Amino acid sequence: MKISIIGDGGWGTALALLGVQNGHDVRLWGAFPEYIAEMNQSRENKKFLPGVILPPKLNLISDMNEALEKPELLIIAVPSKFMPAVLKKMKKRVTRKTEVLSVTKGFERSSGNRISRFISDELEIPEPVVLSGPNIADEV
């Protein structure tokens, strides 16, 4: 399965690792090209998941167009405070046919909506599936 994960924090990185370990083609997108280049070089997410080696099969990218190139599953793992800006970059690139999973905790600040509702409204797609609960990326 072709999986794109938007958000290279600890939770997004942990889910990317699980995807690769289960044989999927995983792309992990981060907003900062310099940091993605550093992660590609070191094969480690030193800021958010230090000490965990990122396998060569995990594609680390900073190009949103590449990240949204026909994923079978799109996982949105962006902190809620950055969600409006990231969804603006994604708008019109995600179709109603795309399976979307939100793993972001919290509420969208300006609207007060659940993140899943905010994603649905902003991207004009059905409300995504949600994975939630207490989690610590290291444990996953």
Image: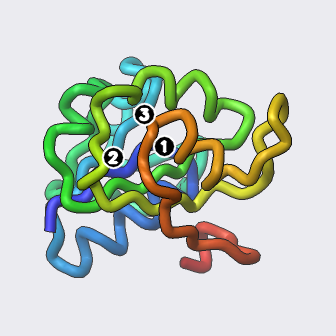
Q: Measure the alpha-carbon separation of dots 2 and 1.
A: 7 Å
Is 94 situated above or below 23? above
Looking at marks 2 and 1 on the same chain, the residue that comes earlier in the sequence is marked by 1
Residue 7: which disc?
A: 1
Q: Residue at x 83, y 29 (%)?
A: 110
Label 1 sits on a secondary structure element that is loop
The residue lying at 49 percent from left, 22 percent from top is 88
Tag 3 secondary structure: loop
Q: Which residue was labeled with disc 3?
A: 30
Quarter holding the C terminus is bottom right
Q: Amino acid at mark 2?
A: Leu
Check whether the beta carbons of the residues at disc 2 and disc 1 lie within 8 A of each other: no
Q: Which residue is mark 2?
A: 28
Proximity of marks 1 and 3: CB atoms separated by less than 8 Å: yes
Report the residue at 25% width, 37% height from top. Answer: 67
Q: Going by the image, does 100 lie left or right of 97? A: right
Q: Are marks 3 and 2 in contact (CB under 8 Å)?
A: yes
Q: Are there few (<14), some (14-19), or many (20+) residues within 10 Å of tag 2?
A: many
State how far apart marks 1 and 3 are (Cα): 5 Å
Give the amino acid at mark 3.
Gly
- Where residue 30 appears, x then y in whole percent? 42, 33
